[in-house]
Image (cartoon, rainbow, N blue to C red):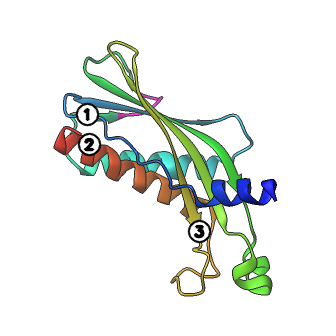
């Protein structure tokens, strides 16, 4: 009985709201996507490329740079994206098992660091899922890890742009 109550409590607990971080003082964003787990270069590249493109398209920063660029600029926000988990499920598996089958998923831990002081501004998780878990979604049953990585990048770009525009 105690185990049941504990599981119910954990499952029904509300998700913690992500506290906005004021990012309006940064001229440059340095993006570093890495992983300590086996990840295809395609997924890592998809996440990095989508994030960099979205941030550049926002026109909020003088530069958005990656590992291949020099990083010795003032007022730099370091966006450290660590891929901490990936679930892969084949399209055939989803067709056979339907909504019971798992989706492709990419889980990351994002750390925002002030480049001048080295201070950690925020650490938070993000998840991308492709395809959605129901047959109502347009991409069901098709999906990929690359699409899930792209979702993560889009979520992160929206957060950073929002926090940079509002000062929160």
Q: CA distance from mark 1 to mark 3?
A: 30 Å
Q: Position of residue 57 (x, y in %)?
A: 26, 51
Q: CA distance from mark 2 to mark 1?
A: 6 Å
State which tag comes first along the sequence, 2 or 1: 1
Q: Residue at x 28, y 29 (%)?
A: 28
Q: Position of residue 20 (x, y in %)?
A: 31, 41
Q: Position of residue 50 (x, y in %)?
A: 43, 52
State which tag comes first along the sequence, 3 or 2: 3
For label 1, the crowd category at 10 Å Cα-Cα, with few meaning under 14, some 14 to 19 and many 20 or more, is: many
**Quadrant placement of the C terminus:** top left
Q: Secondary structure at mark 1?
A: loop
Q: Residue at x 67, y 69 (%)?
A: 103
Residue at image mark 2: 163
135 versus 27 height, above or below: below
Instruction: Please name the predominant secondary structure of the magenta segment in the image.
Output: loop
Nearest the viewer among 140 and 68 is 140
Residue at image mark 1: 23
Eye-nearest disc, 1 or 3:
1
Instruction: State yes or no: residue 164 in magenta.
Output: no
Q: Pick out the residue farthest to the top.
A: 117
Residue range in magenta is: 65-69
Residue at image mark 3: 130
The answer to whether the residues at label 2 and label 1 have Cβ atoms under 8 Å apart is yes
The answer to whether the residues at label 1 and label 3 have Cβ atoms under 8 Å apart is no
Toward which corner of the image does residue 84 lie, by quadrant?
A: top right
């Amino acid at each position: 009985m105690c185990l049941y109550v504990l599981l119910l409590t954990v499952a029904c607990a509300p998700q913690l709201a992500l506290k906005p971080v004021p990012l309006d003082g940064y001229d440059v964003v340095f993006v570093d996507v890495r992983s300590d787990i086996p990840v295809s270069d395609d997924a890592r590249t998809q996440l990095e490329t989508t994030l960099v493109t979205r941030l550049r398209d926002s026109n909020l920063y003088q530069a958005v740079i990656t590992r291949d660029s020099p990083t010795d600029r003032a007022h730099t926000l370091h966006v450290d994206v660590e891929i901490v988990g990936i679930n892969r499920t084949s399209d055939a598996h989803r067709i056979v098992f339907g909504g019971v089958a798992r989706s492709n998923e990419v889980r990351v831990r994002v750390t925002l660091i002030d480049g001048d002081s080295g201070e950690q501004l925020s650490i938070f998780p993000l998840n991308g899922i492709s395809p959605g878990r129901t047959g109502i979604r347009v991409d069901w049953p098709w999906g990929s890890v690359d699409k899930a990585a792209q979702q993560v990048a889009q979520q992160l770009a929206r957060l950073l742009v929002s926090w940079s525009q509002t000062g929160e």
